[in-house]
């Protein structure tokens, strides 16, 4: 059986111009080039960021926490069926867009002050933005998967016929989930963490 020729031997990569963008756009000066090789992405996703668009808004937190909680409950609840039902974050992404636009059209835009601080926020900073939509989808994605340690609690009850203290089950679940979040706090000095 004949082997196919290796495209990477004998200097085959030397003919590739690595400085040429994937698209045929002429670049002049310091312009940024959208050189994504996937045409659909290149046509729909901008390569620049608008820092004036609000991201962590009241709508983001309300809809994000709501979708995270609902997906966590529904997926855990239906996970015990013989034919498990799973609802992913894409479902929440589709449902949240009209709700976010409705909230943008109906919520008041006056500022609320947090007592005893200089902080203030508004429920409606303007139109529903792409950044809010993406963050809500991230919230939903973090709640759509179940905690694997719940399987340990289920096995102890179902197969070993032992009762497990609810606090022990909660502590087991937390100890398997919280270490993943320690990377968020890795910027603190080592003395504070230990």
Image (tube, rainbow, N blue to C red):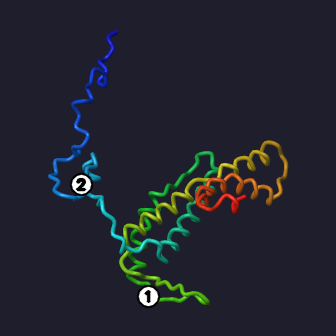
Residue 168: where, in percent of width, then height? 80, 56
C-alpha gap between disc 1 and disc 2 = 40 Å
Identify which residue is drawn at 27% across, 45% down.
Answer: 37
Residue 131: where, in percent of width, then height? 40, 67
Q: Is mark 2 on a helix, strand or loop?
A: loop
* Towards the viewer: 74 or 174: 174
Residue 112: where, in percent of width, then height? 51, 89
Identify which residue is drawn at 44% across, 88% down.
Answer: 108
Tally the marks. Answer: 2
Identify which residue is drawn at 27% across, 29% down.
Answer: 13
Residue at the extreme top of the image, as rendered: 1
Asked if the residues shown at circle 1 and circle 2 are in contact, with their CB atoms under 8 angstroms apart, the answer is no
For the C terminus, the image quarter is bottom right
* 40 w.r.t. 106: above or below: above
Find disc 2 in the rendering and name its residue. 33
Q: Of tags 1 and 2, which is closer to the observer?
A: 2
Find disc 1 in the rendering and name its residue. 108
* 189 w.r.t. 157: above or below: below
Residue 142: where, in percent of width, then height? 55, 58
In the rendered image, which quarter is residue 129 located in? Answer: bottom left
Going by the image, does 39 lie left or right of 134? left
């Amino acid at each position: 059986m004949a082997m196919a020729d290796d495209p990477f031997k004998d200097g085959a990569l030397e003919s590739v111009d690595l400085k040429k963008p994937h698209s045929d756009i002429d670049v002049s000066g310091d312009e940024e080039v959208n050189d994504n090789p996937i045409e659909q992405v290149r046509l729909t996703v901008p390569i620049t960021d608008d820092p004036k668009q609000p991201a962590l808004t009241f709508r983001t937190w309300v809809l994000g926490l709501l979708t995270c909680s609902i997906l966590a409950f529904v997926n855990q609840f239906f996970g015990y069926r013989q034919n498990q039902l799973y609802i992913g974050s894409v479902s929440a992404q589709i449902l949240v867009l009209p709700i976010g636009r409705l909230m943008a059209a109906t919520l008041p835009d006056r500022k609320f002050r947090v007592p005893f601080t200089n902080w203030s926020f508004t429920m409606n900073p303007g139109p529903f933005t792409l950044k809010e939509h993406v963050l809500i989808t991230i919230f939903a994605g973090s709640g759509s998967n179940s905690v694997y340690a719940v399987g340990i609690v289920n096995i102890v009850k179902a197969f070993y016929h032992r009762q497990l203290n609810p606090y022990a089950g909660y502590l087991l679940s937390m100890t398997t989930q919280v270490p993943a979040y320690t990377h968020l706090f890795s910027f603190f000095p080592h003395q504070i963490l230990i």
